[in-house]
Amino acid sequence: MASLLPLLAALAALLRSAHAHGGLNNYTVGETWYPGFDPNLPASLQLHPIPQRQYNTISPLFSATDPALSCNTPGTPAPSQSHITLPAGANLTAIYYHWIHPVGPMTVWLSRCGDSPHDCMTIDTAAASWFKIWEAGLLEGPDLATGMWYQKRFQNWEGGGEGRWEVRVPRGLRSGGYIVRHEVMSVHVENRAQFYVSCGHLEVVRGEGEGEGEGEWMVRFPGAYRQDDPSIDINIYAEEMVGVTDYIIPGGPVWPG
Ligand SMILES: [Cu+2]
């Protein structure tokens, strides 16, 4: 009987995700696990410290100008919001248990809150300034519809992929509190991009740099994207897209840090 349990758990997870989308479930830094917010549970029942901000659905946003584009809905701090402490230059990994979509860019962004992660508690994420620290799109042709995207490699449908999204926090970052924003944009439906966003709180220590992104590096969400951007309003299956491997990831360049 005991041997059936893993099978039943896997089946339950499969059924849950069969008609669903996906979200960021946990973070890790090295061997340390940080539980994510669970959108299937009321916020009041999630009493253990959670570095991830609240989101109430694993469904995507469908508009590049959605007011919730910064940190999802509601995107507010969790009832027992905590933060992840890590040194500048360390790797932060986001875990998605069941990621099913294969095409579209993935990006990671930071917004500085202040000298302390507690400053992140009162930030209006829609009014905050963000700078991109990481991006990945199409890794290999033959074209956008059939090529290998980072998202496809990341895909974890039926446990076949990585489901791990590891990104280095820039070495040149100034110490302090930051909100980290993970965004998966999926473009597998013609001319109907989907945005999956998630935010968490970081305390970056031993930062060697003076900086964070500023000036030209800074964008807002919503604000960074236009719905009619040819990388967003896109039909990868169109006849004229056969053999096309060019794809400009929206939101501007990555801060060199
Ligand atoms: Cu989906």
Image (cartoon, rainbow, N blue to C red):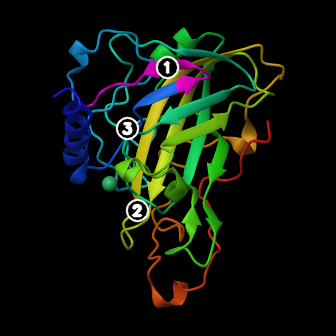
Q: Measure the alpha-carbon separation of dots 2 and 3.
A: 15 Å
Q: Is mark 3 within 8 Å of ligand 1?
A: no
On whether residue 37 falls in the magenta region, the answer is: yes
Image coords of residue 254 (percent x, y): 71, 47
Residue type indicated by callout 3: Asn
In the displayed structure, would residue 181 be above or below residue 37?
Answer: below
Between disc 3 and disc 1, whose residue precedes? 1
Q: Is mark 1 within 8 Å of ligand 1?
A: no
Between disc 2 and disc 3, whose residue precedes? 3
Q: Measure the alpha-carbon separation of dots 2 and 1.
A: 31 Å
Report crowding for label 2: few under 14, some 14 to 19, many 20 or more residues within 10 A (C-alpha): many
Image coords of residue 244 (percent x, y): 61, 81
Tag 2–tag 3 contact (CB < 8 Å):
no
**Would you name the residue on which mark 2 appears?**
193
**Would you name the residue on which mark 3 appears?**
72
Residue extending furthest bottom? 239
Q: Is mark 2 within 8 Å of ligand 1?
A: no
**Considering the image in quadrants, where does the N terminus appear?**
top left
In the displayed structure, would residue 189 be above or below residue 66?
Answer: below
Residue extending furthest left? 1
Look at the image and tell me whether residue 225 can be seen. Answer: no
Residue type indicated by callout 1: Trp
Q: Determine whether the residue tagged by mark 2 lies in a helix, strand or loop.
A: loop
**Would you name the residue on which mark 1 appears?**
33
Res 62 → quadrant: bottom left
Residue type indicated by callout 2: Ala
Report the span colored magenta. 28-39
Q: Residue at x 66, y 44 (%)?
A: 134
